[in-house]
Image (cartoon, rainbow, N blue to C red):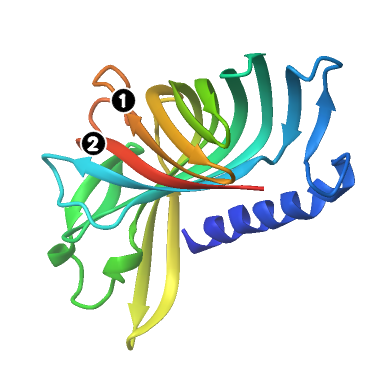
Amino acid sequence: MEMEMKKLVLLALTALVAVPVFAQDEESNRVYTSSSGKAFIELVDHIGYGYHFIQSNDFTPAWSGELCLNLVKFGIRPADVLGIDLGIDIGMSNFSSTQNAFTQVNQLIKATSFDLFAEGSLDRKRSGFNVYSLNAPVILKGIFGKFELGAGAVASWNFAGETTLMYRKDNVRANIEEVKAKVNPFTYCFLATASLDDFGVYFKYYPKSSKLLPEGSVDLSYMTLGLVIGF
């Protein structure tokens, strides 16, 4: 889990370094703007972090969240007060529990009580499961000067999942076990946003028809509330 977080942080830093190379000026990361100014393309427009509000019949959730980095944003402005944004984001979602570790049976994620492990052998705060995805949001926006309100949907391709167990020895982290897990490859959610300049908030709602984990896995449903910082 820590290694994958480091990979995403490294990706974010690399993207931030790359922005000045592609940007047209110091104030913008746009690489294309139509002659009318009503369509544009931006690279690495924002980064966001969201907190998952989890409901499950199988485990008691602990702090869980997502980290998302925008790679490309396409914007259309048919009117001064109306906008349509499309994009491609890369994201990582982490899920953890206060009472359960996550193990696997035939690559299906299961909740296992910490009590079944040798006392003190697991770091409870750093054992959970992760899902990695490419996300494609479509957002209809109302634009009121620097303030924007938006609503739309996000389609996600979940390309990898893993369970993570961090073992401890003599109160020192000794070993990390990461095992590939099955996830449903395609999910979707509905999205609401509000932003002022380069700062914003968002809310994601995942309907019951959009399941992140396949049948037989741990029971999981959630909503997400997050913050966004633009570049």
Q: Position of residue 93 (x, y in %)?
A: 42, 45
Q: Position of residue 71 (x, y in %)?
A: 67, 37
Q: Residue at x 59, y 46 (%)?
A: 198
- Toward the viewer: 214 or 22? 22
Q: Residue at x 22, y 38 (%)?
A: 218
> In the image, which disc is placed on residue 211?
1
144 sits to left or right of 107? right
When asked about the image quadrant of residue 36, the answer is top right
> What residue is disc 2 on?
220
Q: Residue at x 13, y 43 (%)?
A: 58
Task: Name which residue type carries label 2.
Answer: Leu
Q: Please, what secondary structure does the residue beneath circle 2 have?
A: loop
Relative to 122, say whether 10 is above or below: above
Q: Please, what secondary structure does the residue beneath circle 1 have?
A: loop
Q: Are marks 2 and 1 in contact (CB under 8 Å)?
A: yes
- Toward the viewer: 194 or 1? 194
Label 2, label 1: how far apart the Cα atoms are: 8 Å
Q: Residues within 10 Å of mark 2 (few under 14, many from 20)?
A: some
Relative to 172, say whether 61 is above or below: above
